[in-house]
Amino acid sequence: MVREILKLGNPKLYEVCGEVTNEEREMVKEWVKDLHDTLMDYRKTYGAGRAVAAPQIGVPKRLLYMYTDRPYVFINPVLTFPDEEVYELVDDCMSFPGLMVRVSRHRRADIRYLDENFEPRAMHLEGDLSELLQHEYDHLDGILATMRAVDNKSLILGQMKRDF
Ligand SMILES: [Zn+2]
């Protein structure tokens, strides 16, 4: 089901999300379906959007959904950085379409998580995927890209990134 995407300023976007528990396995299936439908609907409207975090549809759980070459489900992800190299990019978010923000992200990251079958997985991330999952992971801690602006002149209105 396509869900409403919570927008910048909604207090629910600034909450720290709780871990997904084993008892929530059945709920996860529903949430993932809703995240997929909502992401696809957003793409249809805006022509962009690679991933979405559960809190963006009002589910305060540590759950991410990404659709690139195929769908990926990240349950209770843990993100770490193998080195300190960072770079700047212009970021966007489904919670504030049309607003861009210049942020700094780690070039490389490692993510450990449970997949949709609750199997432990790990992935090494570079560049685009690294910055994307840092963005999504931040949502789980109530952090929006606007809060990562490199300075107070880094908000840009009226552009859309189209590189998913
Ligand atoms: Zn976002």
Image (spheres, rainbow, N blue to C red):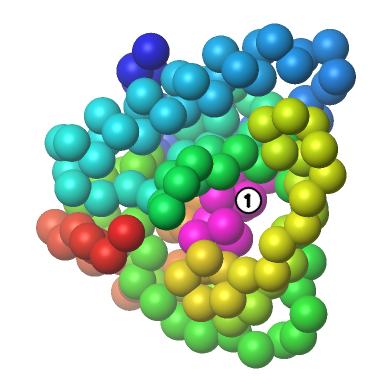
Query: Quadrant of the rendered structure where residue 141 is?
Result: top right
Query: Quadrant of the rendered structure where residue 100 is?
Result: bottom left
In the image, what residue type sits under mark 1? Tyr
Does residue 117 appear to the left or right of 158 in the view shown?
Answer: right
Q: Is mark 1 within 8 Å of ligand 1?
A: no
Q: Nearer the viewer, residue 158 or 124?
A: 124
- The residue to which callout 1 is attached is 137
- Residue at x 45% of width, y 20% of height: 34
- Residue at x 56% of width, y 30% of height: 54
Examine the rendered structure and indicate whether residue 134 appears above or below residue 96. below
Q: Residue 61's x, y, as percent? A: 68, 28
- Residue at x 57% of width, y 68% of height: 130
Magenta residue check for 141: yes
Q: Residue 50's x, y, as percent? A: 39, 50
For the record, the magenta segment spans 132-143
Quadrant containing the C terminus is bottom left
Q: Residue furthest bottom?
A: 85
Residue 147 appears in the figure: no
- Residue at x 69% of width, y 69% of height: 124
Residue 103 appears in the figure: yes
Give the tally of numbered discs. 1
Magenta residue check for 105: no
Q: Nearer the viewer, residue 15 or 62?
A: 62
Does residue 161 appear to the left or right of 66 in the view shown?
Answer: left
Quadrant containing the N terminus is top left
Secondary structure of the residue carrying numbered label 1: helix
Q: Residue 4's x, y, as percent? A: 35, 20
> Chief secondary structure of the magenta span?
helix
Examine the rendered structure and indicate whether residue 2 appears above or below residue 133. above
Q: 10 Å neighbourhood of mark 1: few (<14), some, or many (≥20)?
A: many
